[in-house]
């Protein structure tokens, strides 16, 4: 059964104003399904890394003659020769909605599209399901959109609660890929094993040469254990006996295929007092659980990585909700050399929005100490009320609760 996606209305609107649109994201996040749903009458060509579909690589102009716009070009990274030909077509007869392209690699092809079609193409990134999409309630504005526009208004008029949700441990263990949303729990490990094998053996091999695939597999397992941690490339390399340059390059491969996201450190004006290391997150918590060899949702209870995996899930949710915004906020984390930290800082319109993520149903003032430290360290900045995002609020049907003079706790089940 098709589930409405948060990006649907935005993609329709963008396709109505730009001649080319690129929808990029990891494998199996639902790009092709979404595009076919939004443009049911538009022909689709799916490219392949081995076969030259329609001689697109050998003779791109003839291919486009045989496939006039509007046209959907799925997995465009496998036919980079088309990009200059598409540019010429757009320049000769520029009109909205000519080409919709999807891609699962942020590599040279998408870079080439960005450079060659500057002013003619718009890019949108897509991830796996959000909580609202799983619950069948993707609305605009989201609770985050409302919070960025008017935190005080959200406090006065709190959001509602999603009607359909799984237990938090099951959702984190199952992950956010559309196929994993529908299959039985007992085959989830097989799904993630197949996904990981396909990803390593197909996508990464096509990007660059990795000489030792067993070592690369160990590297992927290592970074799963580093979810929500600051990234030290030298330490990463030492842990599996590779150079820091190799560790950085391999993380670049994971980022290029949308499997890994980094959140830079906030610097502001107090550069010397703030850590410069980014924090890293695997895109899908289900894949992270598989790499950590967690055999069932119940194994998350009390596990040392439970808090980090919940943080990873919430950060991914924030990224998905930010993608809906016409002007996306910048995303940072903050940590002082004294150890105070804020998990997420969103910056937009001259305001900073601090967010803490805690795996607790009993949030209290102690969970706001990092945000208090950030305010004390940056008294000259405009800082909005803080959020402590939790799996839920014990003993209450509410999704929002004030826990200090500045800050509130919010359930991740908030709808709008």
Image: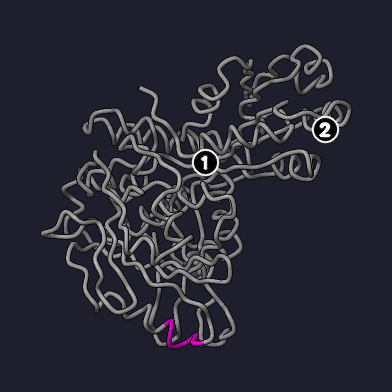
Magenta segment main secondary structure: helix
Please name the residue shown 26% across and 30% down the image: 187
User: Is 273 displayed left or right of 117 in the figure?
Assistant: left
Where does the magenta region start and end? 374-379
Q: Where is residue 374 in the image (x, y as percent from the top left)?
A: 43, 81
Q: Position of residue 75 (x, y in %)?
A: 61, 29
Q: Among all residues in the image, which is located at the extreme top? A: 66
Position above or below: 41 against 250: above
Q: Is residue 376 magenta?
A: yes
Position above or below: 13 against 412: above
Position above or below: 393 against 35: below
Inter-mark Cα distance, 2 to 1: 24 Å
Please name the residue shown 59% across and 14% down the image: 41
- The quadrant holding residue 107 is top right
Please name the residue shown 72% across and 35% down the image: 18
Q: Where is residue 352 in the image (x, y as percent from the top left)?
A: 50, 71
Please name the residue shown 77% across and 38% down the image: 120
Q: Which of the labelled discs sits on residue 335, or is there none?
A: none
Query: Quarter holding the N terminus?
Result: top left
Query: Which mark is first along the chain, 1 or 2?
Result: 2
Q: Does the magenta stretch include residue 73?
A: no
Q: Nearer the viewer, residue 351 or 51?
A: 351
Name the residue that disc number 1 marks.
Answer: 126
Q: Position of residue 117 (x, y in %)?
A: 79, 39
User: Is 207 displayed left or right of 137 in the figure?
Assistant: right
Q: Which of 43 and 158 is in front in this view?
A: 158
Name the residue that disc number 2 marks.
Answer: 87
- Element type at marker 2? helix
Q: Residues within 10 Å of mark 1 (few under 14, many from 20)?
A: many
């Amino acid at each position: 059964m098709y589930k409405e996606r948060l990006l649907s209305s935005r993609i329709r609107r963008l396709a109505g104003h730009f001649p080319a649109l690129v929808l990029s994201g990891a494998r199996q996040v639902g790009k092709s399904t979404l595009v076919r749903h939004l443009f049911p009458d538009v022909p689709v060509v799916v490219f392949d890394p081995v076969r030259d579909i329609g001689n697109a690589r050998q003779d791109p102009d003839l291919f486009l003659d045989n496939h006039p716009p509007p046209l959907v070009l799925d997995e465009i990274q496998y036919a980079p020769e088309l990009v200059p030909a598409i540019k010429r077509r757009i320049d000769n007869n520029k009109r909205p909605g000519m080409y919709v392209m999807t891609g699962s690699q942020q590599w040279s092809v998408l870079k080439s599209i960005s450079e060659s079609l500057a002013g003619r193409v718009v890019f949108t990134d897509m991830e796996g399901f959000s909580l609202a999409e799983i619950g069948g309630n993707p609305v605009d504005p989201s609770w985050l959109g409302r919070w960025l526009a008017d935190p005080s208004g959200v406090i006065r008029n709190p959001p509602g609660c999603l009607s359909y949700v799984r237990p938090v441990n099951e959702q984190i263990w199952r992950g956010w890929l559309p196929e994993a949303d529908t299959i039985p729990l007992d085959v989830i490990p097989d799904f993630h094993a197949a996904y990981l094998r396909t990803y390593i053996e197909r996508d990464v091999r096509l990007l660059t040469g990795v000489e030792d695939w067993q070592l690369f597999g160990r590297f992927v397992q290592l970074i799963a254990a580093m979810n929500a941690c600051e990234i030290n490339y030298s330490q990463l390399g030492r842990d599996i006996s590779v150079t820091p340059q190799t560790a950085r390059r391999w993380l670049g491969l994971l980022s290029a295929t949308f499997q890994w996201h980094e959140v830079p450190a906030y610097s502001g004006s107090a550069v010397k007092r703030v850590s410069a290391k980014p924090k890293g997150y695997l895109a899908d918590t289900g894949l992270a659980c598989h790499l950590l060899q967690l055999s069932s949702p119940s194994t998350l209870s009390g596990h040392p990585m439970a808090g980090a995996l919940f943080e990873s899930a919430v950060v991914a949710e924030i990224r998905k909700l930010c993608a809906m915004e016409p002007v996306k906020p910048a995303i940072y984390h903050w940590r002082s050399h004294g150890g105070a930290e804020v998990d997420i800082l969103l910056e937009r319109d001259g305001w900073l929005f601090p967010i803490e993520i805690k795996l607790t149903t009993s949030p209290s003032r102690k969970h706001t100490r990092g945000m208090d430290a950030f305010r004390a360290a940056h008294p000259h900045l405009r800082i909005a009320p803080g959020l402590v995002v939790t799996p839920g609020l014990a003993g209450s049907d509410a999704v929002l609760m004030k826990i200090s003079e500045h800050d509130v706790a919010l359930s991740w089940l908030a709808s709008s």
